[in-house]
Amino acid sequence: MSIEVRHIHKQFGTFTALDDVSLAFPDGRLTALLGPSGCGKTTLLRIIAGLEHPDRGQVLLEGEDAVHANVRQRQVGFVFQHYALFKHMTVFENVAFGLRVKPRRERPSDAKIREKVMDLLQLVQLEWLADRRPAALSGGQRQRIALARALAVEPRVLLLDEPFGALDAKVRKELRRWLRRLHDDLHVTSIFVTHDQEEALEVADEVVIMNKGRVEQKGAPQAVYDDPATAFVCGFLGHMNLFHGRVQGGRLQSGEMHFALPGGAANDAPGTAYVRPYDIQIEPCSPGDAARDDNTGLRVSLRRAQALGPLAQLELTREDTQEIIEVVMPSQEFDRIRARGCHHFIARPSRARVFFGSGA
């Protein structure tokens, strides 16, 4: 089912949760709403579900305005962060609940309900727990039961609010892979809320990044990661080294290093270059060695190093500003450098994203 929101605005007292948000969610795709706490992503999800009403704007389901339709009419399945399972019911009865409370003319027979519930429990690979109560289940199992319950009513759209946020890292990683496989089998239009960048980039077909009630960027995960549209997106998606400076002579000057800029950049304007840790190469040097005549390198000294499996993480101190920058490189390459007893280096960013303005 296609979903579209147009010019959604939502205010809670003096706080603006959503500020003129317009988005289209592709039919049969899995979309992640990603952003920090308080950015409006859960509010938007609840408005799509019918659990909140916007102050103004439209929610279109299959092209029809659903703002005044209730939750049942919208035919959405909702999965909450904390499972919301009924503790006094068995796993089977939890999944069957949505079918049993349907109006009599729509309610399946007991035999049909049993067949459907068992099919769903097999789908989430937990049919062997049908007679258990939620208290006897692990967190990951409870979340899969919550998802089965949401799917039991055959929703036109599946909405998930931080579905794995209450789980430990290992279980969370396993479940998001499982969710991706499940979605590929079912092709239900799905929207899930998360503040975990890795989760969104790994699971979703499309990512919507939100900040302060507005949409900062929308696109395929790889495209958003490789080509961030704003300084916020650039800084939010993974760790960045920030090189603050000013634009002079068509380049951003940051201490003893500069970054080339495209034509048309204003002179004497503040700017910041964003560089990912693995986009910095280092080479050993002696103390006091010049970085390079063209100022594309930076003298640094080693502050701390830690090898984590195939990668080494280095903390380096800039000799011009004393600021810390981080570099990630293959452990084997760092082992060769360490064997030479080197503590001073020339660091050269191979790729940077520059944004202008004091807020960059």
Image: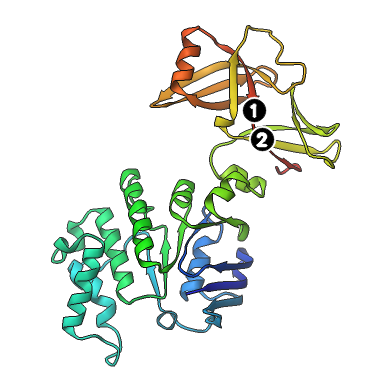
Q: Which residue is mark 1?
A: 349
The picture places residue 49, in percent across and down from the top left corner, at: 46, 73
State the image quarter where residue 146 is shown.
bottom left
Cα separation, mark 1 vs mark 2, equals: 7 Å
Q: Find residue 90 and report its image quarter.
A: bottom left
For this rendering, which residue is in front, 146 or 278? Answer: 278
Q: Tell which of 37 and 156 is nearer to you.
A: 156
Label 2: few (<14), some or many (≥20) within 10 Å? Answer: some
Q: Quadrant of the C terminus?
A: top right
The amino acid beneath tag 2 is Ala
Q: Is residue 44 above or below residue 315?
A: below
Q: Position of residue 35 (x, y in %)?
A: 54, 53
Residue 70 lies, with reference to residue 208, above or below; the image says below
Query: Would you name the residue on which mark 2 appears?
Result: 352
Position in image of residue 180 (x %, y %): 38, 56
Pointer 1 and pointer 2: residues touching (CB < 8 Å)? yes
| Residue displayed at 44% across by 19% down | 332
Q: Secondary structure at mark 2?
A: loop
